[in-house]
Every structure is written in C-alpha cells, then in structure tokens.
Image (spheres, rainbow, N blue to C red):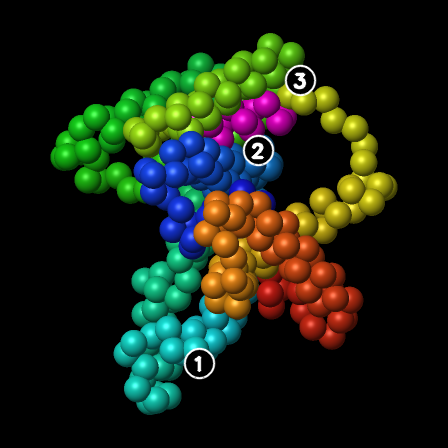
C-alpha cells in the first residue's frame, strides 16, 4: 500500500523524466513493484485455500470489492464535477447521472481504479485456479510459470506478434498470482531461497534503476523475488505490540486507502505545491506517502468506531 501511494505521489508530480537520472529510475524501480507485490501476496493467501463453493466465493469477494468501489467512485465523481475537472459538465444533472456508469466502467473517474478492474478479473478465474493448482505437481506448476515467462519475453522482443493480441494485461498478473502460490508452497522456510530472493531482488532493482530500458518482465520478477525474500525472513510475534496493531489496522484499511488516496494527494498538491522550492520536489513523495497513510489511518480508525455505519461502505476489511 505504501509503494502504491508513493507511486502516485511521484507520478502526479510528473517526475518520470530522463533529466532526473537515478532519481527517476530509483523511484520507478521501487514504486512500480507495489501492485504486482500485492498480486503475489494475494496468490499466497487465496490460492492456497481450499476452494469455496463458487457462489459463496463470488458473493463474498464481489460484495467486499464492488460496494465500496461504486460508493467511493460516486463520491469522487461528484467532487470532480464540483471542482470543474470534467470539461463536458454543463450544469445538466441528468447528463451527469447518465455519464456516471460509463465513466465507472471505462475507468475515467480515477487513474488508480484500473487496479479494481484487474482485481475483479483475477477473482473471476481464482476458483478455477484453486481447483487446478491443487492437482498439479511442482514440476507442472514450474512448467506453467515457464510458459508465462516465455510469453512475457515475447511481449518485450516482438510485441506485434499476432498471438499476443489474444492475451491481455491479465497475463502479466496471472503469472505473479500463480508464483505467489508456488513460492508459498515450495520455496519457503529455507535459507537458500532467502539468499536467492535477496540477490535477485537487488539485481533486478539495479537493472530498473540504472538503465533506461524498462523491461516488461523486470517489475513482476522483482515483485516475485521480493515476495520470496519476505516469506523466508524469520518472523516474530508482534501482534500484541503497538507496531503489530498498527500493521493490522493498515491491512484492514488498505482498500479504503487505495480507493481514496489519489484524491487526497491531489488536494494536498493543489494547496501546497506552489509554495515548495523546485529543488525539494523530488523528495516530496517521501513526505507525502507517510502523511497520507497517517491521515487515512486516523480517518478509518474514527469511522471504525461508529457502529451504525457499515464498514463495507468504504472498504474497511
């Protein structure tokens, strides 16, 4: 969640320019790992479960994802109209109502909402993956991941290849999703995998940070090896500590933060950006990111205590 917030705090400042050199490459190599790392973690947590009845699985996930998505998108849509972000707004309320659903379905309300559409696509195939992966051997899953890797390489070196037109962006995240399952099942609690994860993460980060070539396979692989590293780091029980409680709450609030953080970042920038010296601009995402996390931590904590307001309205888990 922190990486995702930082990515938008960085991109909304338009810092992705070659003149910034390592600052640009360093940011990009770090923050772009956020979404695939989340997908990897979802593969660890979801694909390892025993399959639920199909209706129960879809009802539970769609209710958890869609209700806050639609409600908070509507709030953001109304605010965007009120501050004049939509050039087509002519004061006609009926027209605004008619435009809401197409804007929602076409991802025109918020730049970060594409993630929700991708997540829904992953959830659609999850029950089938759960049934299938539990029946496959280790070598067979390795074969699946090899096919995925070959497809990603072909996308990079021959993007106009006709067969690639029949695959979508889901292909990228599907491989990371399955890798989460594989690593948590076959590459965990082993110091060798910890070292492999650290070394590969460092190499892939260096490639992303110090070269101008953005390889499509680099970011998902970085997420996979970083995830492998995290799963093999010795852990300690911190749930009763202040830090443990904070982490648990951020986990519960993460979807709410995701749905609203872009609007909060934009508001902060509109109020402050003209007063910030140009030399300090590259450091702003490092300040804005923890600020956004703390703001929503406080907001969600207060909301969480209001018993007559359902948590699922704003996505609190």
Q: Magenta residues, as a range?
A: 219-231
Can the viewer see residue 186? no
| Tags 3 and 2 touching, CB below 8 Å | no
Pick whichever, 151 or 274, lies toward us: 274
| Tags 1 and 2 touching, CB below 8 Å | no
Residue pushed farthest top? 192
SS of the residue at dot 2? helix
Query: Position of 198 compared to 139: left or right?
Result: right
What's the residue at 59%, 13% (across, down)? 195
Between the C-alphas of marks 3 and 1, the distance is 53 Å
Majority SS type along the magenta span = helix
What's the residue at 47%, 76% (across, down)? 79
Find disc 2 in the rendering and name its residue: 44
Q: Position of residue 203 (x, y in %)?
A: 46, 19
Q: Position of residue 309 (x, y in %)?
A: 69, 73
Query: Position of 49 compared to 236: left or right?
Result: left
Question: In this rendering, is residue 224 above or below 265?
Answer: above
Find disc 1 in the rendering and name its residue: 82
Can the viewer see residue 195? yes
Find disc 3 in the rendering and name its residue: 189
Comparing labels 1 and 2, the label whose residue is closer to the camera: 1
Query: Position of 288 compared to 299: left or right?
Result: left
Question: In this rendering, is residue 267 above or below 4?
Answer: below
What's the residue at 54%, 27% (across, down)? 226
Q: Residues within 10 Å of mark 2 (few under 14, many from 20)?
A: many
SS of the residue at dot 1? helix
Question: In this rendering, is residue 284 above or below 77?
Answer: above
Pick whichever, 17 or 96, lies toward us: 17
Q: Position of residue 121 (x, y in %)?
A: 40, 48
- The quarter holding residue 78 reads bottom left
Pick whichever, 285 or 80, lies toward us: 285
């Amino acid at each position: 969640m922190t990486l995702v917030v930082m990515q938008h705090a960085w991109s909304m400042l338009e810092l992705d320019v070659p003149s910034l050199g390592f600052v640009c490459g360093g940011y990009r190599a770090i923050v772009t790992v956020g979404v695939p790392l989340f997908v990897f973690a979802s593969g660890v947590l979801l694909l390892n479960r025993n399959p639920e009845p199909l209706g129960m699985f879809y009802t539970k996930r769609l209710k958890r994802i869609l209700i806050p998505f639609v409600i908070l998108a509507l709030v953001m849509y109304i605010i965007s109209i009120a501050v004049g972000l939509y050039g087509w707004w002519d004061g006609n309320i009926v027209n605004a109502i008619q435009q809401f659903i197409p804007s929602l379905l076409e991802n025109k309300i918020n730049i970060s909402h594409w993630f929700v559409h991708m997540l829904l696509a992953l959830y659609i195939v999850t029950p089938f993956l759960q049934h299938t992966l539990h029946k496959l051997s280790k070598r067979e899953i390795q074969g699946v991941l090899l096919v995925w890797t070959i497809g990603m390489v072909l996308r990079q070196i021959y993007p106009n290849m006709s067969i690639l037109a029949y695959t979508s962006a889901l292909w990228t995240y599907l491989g990371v999703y399955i890798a989460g399952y594989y690593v948590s099942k076959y590459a965990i609690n082993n110091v060798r995998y910890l070292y492999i994860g650290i070394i590969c993460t460092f190499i892939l980060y260096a490639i992303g940070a110090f070269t101008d070539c953005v390889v499509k396979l680099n970011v998902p692989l970085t997420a996979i090896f970083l995830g492998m590293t995290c799963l093999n780091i010795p852990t300690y029980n911190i749930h009763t500590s202040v830090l443990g409680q904070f982490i648990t709450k951020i986990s519960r609030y993460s979807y709410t933060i995701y749905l609203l953080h872009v609007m909060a970042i934009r508001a902060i920038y509109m109020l402050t950006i003209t007063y910030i010296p140009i030399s300090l601009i590259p450091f702003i995402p490092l300040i804005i990111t923890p600020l956004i996390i703390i703001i929503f931590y406080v907001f969600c904590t207060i909301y969480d205590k209001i018993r007559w307001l359902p948590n699922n309205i704003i996505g609190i888990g």
